[in-house]
Image (spheres, rainbow, N blue to C red):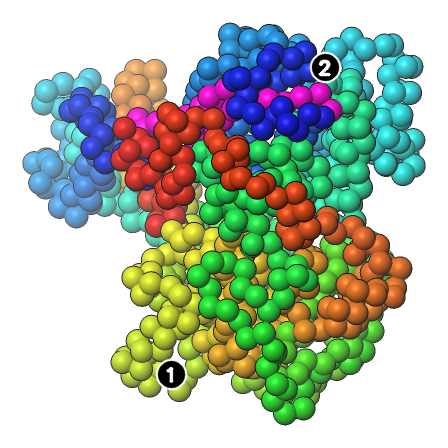
């Protein structure tokens, strides 16, 4: 793309401005805000997320209460801000669990001796065919609802899909001509896997993993919403949704606002992931 | 045909009825992302009834765009300008898409290079060909299907009734190409445009396709042939245009252009075609002359011995095919053994067996006296640097994340890696060996030209100081002048390093140019072996005889039979007066000029 731009080609300022990736800037700005909320929530709000104020219960969004208040008069904006410190680690943790599992399973399936690889292939197919939600339910029934079991349930649910991607990428890289060329030069197999196969196979997946964070947050929130994760007094976003559910006809913002936050987080993660992806793809052509 | 008329400057020529296509000052440009690039600058010629005009050039010469502009198919972002563009006397410059559609098929047939992508994979051949008839309202259903069979028979498709019911994927490359030709000539168009019609084909199939084009010409069709292959062009063309960088460097009757070319580039193109007559000579100007007498055998012990190689593959349905059956040969130090064969002959599998990349089902390979094929992989690894490989597609054989420097470093043997300075010195030595600028070390192969990539690939193969280099179709994807440079380079490297080559190619010309001895393979077996002289001079096996007979005759010496006494009447590019100096320039114009 850049190669076609002629030197001396003039672009006016408006065209230059239109070319900036504004969506990306907004996404990064939002991600920074989330990070601040998770690490130092007091910088964003002066209230206490669990301070009760019954007279101010169920108020609509206003200048004092930006997102309104819940049935006990707690400020929803403050709760959403404090919820970041619970929801984000769960989402990130679940993404990490999913990715690590996917890497282990996928690379075993592609690189291990044939009979082991085939066994892992079958295991992946079973996991893939099994509804992820059912798998999560099973795990939570066994270990009881908690943030930790939520992390593992979501991680386990997303792992098979990514594992298949890892497997496919590694298999493709294994068959590449440069791998054969390295073999012909007399390099050891372990060196070829380390130097050629893994980097080439996994690089395109970096972006996919960034995308999975957004997905994991949505998943974790849904589990909490179903009462299978963090329970309602906590300001976790899924729990907020769950708590707001009873008042959906009276005070819809209790449900809509946390829902929008979850959507926004996953859009931001996706936008950043996409950008990363196209950067990496362009890097291939460097 | 009236060759004399064509050599005249065409604007002085009286308009005749048999001029089917008249082109004057054709220009085509593409605009992309704010830049405009002219890819065809001033092409002029006449295509007469029963005549073949050929446009010859290497990649990027604008020959295909020229062909497409003539029939209104330049594609998106393309602009075409011409002083004259007449089809059967009608000005086509104002044609709309509808006018073109009425002409294409009925009056102009188009044969493209790759039949697999040009034919719809889901439609049987008879539907594909029948459609050309149907859209132009030809006959009824029954007569159309008779016509399809007739056409397939005419282009030499065996079992036309069976083939007509098959889909392109079920046909071999040669049959597909013939089916495509059949659909192009379905309505007996007066003009057939053939863009590299035989490039992907084996030489025996190529001979059949060329024969069909020749007989169409005999029947009065006009053929515009686009090709990079001078030997193909020499077979068919009456009039030749030589293009480079979008410009016509030279044009005239075939015998004159090929026999006594006036332009340096044409001369270089002709000299670059390898063959028996070029043995022991450099192919590209500027290459040091090669030692006429081949190097004396250094010791008699062969570096490589293959005995009774057998390789079978089991298909997904359990069927077993024997890709290589009982192949034996030896390779002496400093010798070049050529393996020639058509697609599916097992020549590449033989290469992979020799390289130890494929397990043998029977037979042995000995490398430098060691039982190479019997060694376990761990022990073989230590010997691998003694036998290296250069592939047809160098780009895919390089890790895309690596620069040239990293690629070459990776191939250096331990003794060359002792210190940063020895590494550096060896890298520079390797680059000098293959005539590459040290500046390229920091580049990614993707940013190199095809010839540079193959040079890097050769440097990598030589880095471990091997005894044998396997060259698997190593020059097949290159333009003919680049191929000539690489062949010259390989000859020089063999002379300086004494390395042995196992040279695998489908191209008989290349094989006869490089080989000391030749193995002819068919269906996995060696049908004949011998020196180039015996193979090409007195082939014994019927298949070898057929192969040799299929080679398009191309010996420039035989074309100089009708030399021109006075070089002045030589045809000049028609726009020479307008842009004389630029026409004769073979240097690319700077990017700024192209885009301004």
Q: Considering only order in the chain, which callout, 2 or 1, is on the residue closer to the N terminus?
A: 2
| Residue B142 among magenta residues | no
Q: Would you say A82 lies left or right of B497 here? A: left
Q: CA distance from mark 1 to mark 2?
A: 66 Å
Q: Is the residue marked by circle 1 packed among few (<14), some (14-19), or many (20+) residues within 10 Å? A: some
Magenta stretch, main secondary structure, is: strand
| Residue B43 among magenta residues | yes
Secondary element at image label 2: loop
Question: Is residue B288 shown above or below B123?
Answer: below
Magenta range: B24-50
Q: Position of residue A209 (x, y in %)?
A: 39, 48
Q: According to the image, label 2 marks what residue?
A: B106
Q: Where is the N terminus of chain B found, in terms of image quarters?
A: top right
Front: mark 1 or 2: 2
Question: Is residue B323 shown above or below B81?
Answer: below
Q: Is the residue marked by circle 2 packed among few (<14), some (14-19), or many (20+) residues within 10 Å? A: many
Q: Would you say B545 lies left or right of B425 here? A: right
Give me the residue at 81% from left, 24% from top. Answer: B219
Q: Would you say B321 lies left or right of B462 here? A: right
Residue A229 shows in this picture = no
Q: Nearer the viewer, residue A44 or B476?
A: B476
Q: Position of residue B510 (x, y in %)?
A: 64, 60
Q: According to the image, label 1 marks what residue?
A: B416
**Tally of marks:** 2
Q: Nearer the viewer, residue B3 or B479?
A: B3
Question: Is residue A64 shown above or below B474?
Answer: above
């Amino acid at each position: 793309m850049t190669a076609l731009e002629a030197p001396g080609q003039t672009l006016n300022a408006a065209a230059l401005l239109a070319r900036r990736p504004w969506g990306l800037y907004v996404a990064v700005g939002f991600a920074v805000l989330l990070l601040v909320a998770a690490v130092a929530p007091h910088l964003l709000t002066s209230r206490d997320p669990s301070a009760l104020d019954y007279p101010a219960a169920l108020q609509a969004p206003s200048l004092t209460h930006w997102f309104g208040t819940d049935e006990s008069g707690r400020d929803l904006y403050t709760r959403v801000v404090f919820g970041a410190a619970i929801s984000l680690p769960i989402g990130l943790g679940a993404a990490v669990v999913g990715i690590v599992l996917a890497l282990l399973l996928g690379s075993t399936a592609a690189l291990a001796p044939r009979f082991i690889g085939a066994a892992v292939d079958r295991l992946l197919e079973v996991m893939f065919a099994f509804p992820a939600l059912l798998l999560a339910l099973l795990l939570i029934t066994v270990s009881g609802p908690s943030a930790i079991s939520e992390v593992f349930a979501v991680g386990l649910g997303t792992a098979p899909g990514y594992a298949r991607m890892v497997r496919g990428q590694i298999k493709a890289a294994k068959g590449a001509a440069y791998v054969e060329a390295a073999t012909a030069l007399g390099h050891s197999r372990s060196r070829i896997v380390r130097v050629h196969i893994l980097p080439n196979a996994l690089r395109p997946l970096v972006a996919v993993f960034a995308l999975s964070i957004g997905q994991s947050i949505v998943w974790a929130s849904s589990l909490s919403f179903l009462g299978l994760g963090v329970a309602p007094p906590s300001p976790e976003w899924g729990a907020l949704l769950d708590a707001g559910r009873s008042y959906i006809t009276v005070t819809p913002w209790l449900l809509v606002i946390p829902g929008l936050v979850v959507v926004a987080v996953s859009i931001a993660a996706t936008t950043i992931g996409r950008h990363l992806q196209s950067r990496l793809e362009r890097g291939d052509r460097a | 045909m009236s060759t004399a008329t064509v050599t005249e400057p065409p604007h002085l020529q009286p308009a005749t009825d048999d001029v089917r296509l008249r082109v004057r000052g054709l220009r085509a440009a593409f605009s992309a992302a704010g830049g405009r690039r002219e890819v065809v600058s001033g092409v002029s010629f006449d295509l007469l009834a029963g005549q073949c005009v050929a446009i010859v050039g290497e990649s990027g010469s604008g020959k295909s765009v020229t062909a497409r502009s003539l029939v209104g198919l330049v594609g998106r972002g393309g602009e075409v300008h011409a002083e004259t563009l007449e089809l059967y006397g009608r000005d086509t410059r104002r044609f709309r898409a509808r006018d073109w559609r009425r002409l294409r098929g009925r009056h102009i047939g188009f044969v493209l290079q790759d039949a697999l992508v040009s034919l719809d994979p889901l439609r049987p051949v008879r539907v594909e060909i029948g459609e050309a008839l149907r859209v132009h309202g030809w006959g009824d259903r029954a007569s159309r299907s008779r016509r399809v069979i007739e056409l397939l028979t005419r282009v030499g498709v065996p079992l036309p009734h069976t083939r007509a019911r098959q889909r392109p994927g079920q046909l071999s490359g040669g049959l597909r190409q013939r089916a495509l030709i059949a659909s192009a000539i379905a309505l007996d168009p007066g003009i057939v445009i053939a863009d590299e019609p035989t490039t992907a084909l084996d030489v025996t199939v190529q001979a059949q396709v060329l024969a069909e084009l020749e007989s169409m010409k005999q029947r009065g069709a006009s053929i515009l042939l686009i090709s990079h292959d001078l030997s193909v062009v020499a077979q068919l063309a009456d009039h030749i245009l030589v293009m480079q960088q979008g410009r016509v460097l030279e044009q005239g009757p075939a015998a004159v252009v090929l026999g006594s070319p006036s332009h340096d580039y044409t001369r270089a193109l002709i000299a670059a075609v390898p063959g028996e007559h070029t043995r022991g000579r450099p192919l590209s100007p500027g290459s040091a002359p090669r030692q006429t007498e081949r190097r004396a055998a250094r010791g008699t012990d062969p570096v490589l011995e293959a005995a009774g190689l057998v390789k079978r593959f089991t298909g997904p349905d359990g069927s077993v095919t024997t890709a290589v059956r009982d192949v034996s040969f030896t390779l002496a130090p400093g010798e070049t053994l050529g393996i020639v064969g058509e697609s599916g002959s097992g020549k590449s599998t033989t290469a992979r067996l020799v390289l130890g990349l494929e397990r043998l089902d029977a037979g042995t390979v000995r490398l430098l006296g060691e039982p190479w094929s019997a060694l376990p992989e761990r022990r073989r690894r230590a010997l691998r640097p003694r036998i290296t490989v250069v592939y047809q597609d160098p780009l895919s054989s390089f890790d895309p994340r690596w620069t040239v420097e990293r690629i070459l470093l990776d191939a250096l043997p331990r003794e060359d890696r002792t210190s940063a300075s020895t590494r550096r010195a060896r890298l520079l030595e390797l680059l000098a060996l293959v005539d590459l600028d040290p500046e390229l070390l920091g580049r990614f192969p993707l940013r190199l030209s095809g010839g540079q990539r193959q040079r890097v690939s050769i440097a990598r193969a030589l880095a471990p100081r091997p005894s044998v280099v396997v060259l698997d179709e190593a020059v097949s994807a290159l333009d003919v002048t680049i191929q000539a440079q690489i062949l010259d380079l390989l000859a020089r490297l063999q002379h300086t390093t004494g390395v042995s080559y196992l040279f695998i190619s489908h191209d008989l010309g290349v094989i006869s140019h490089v080989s000391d001895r030749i193995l002819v393979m068919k269906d996995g077996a060696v049908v004949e072996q011998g020196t180039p002289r015996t193979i090409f001079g007195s082939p014994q096996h019927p298949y070898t005889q057929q192969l040799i007979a299929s080679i398009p005759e191309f010996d420039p010496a035989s074309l100089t039979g009708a030399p021109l006494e006075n070089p002045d009447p030589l045809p000049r590019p028609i726009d020479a007066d307008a842009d004389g100096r630029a026409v004769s320039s073979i240097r690319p114009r700077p990017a700024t000029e192209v885009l301004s």
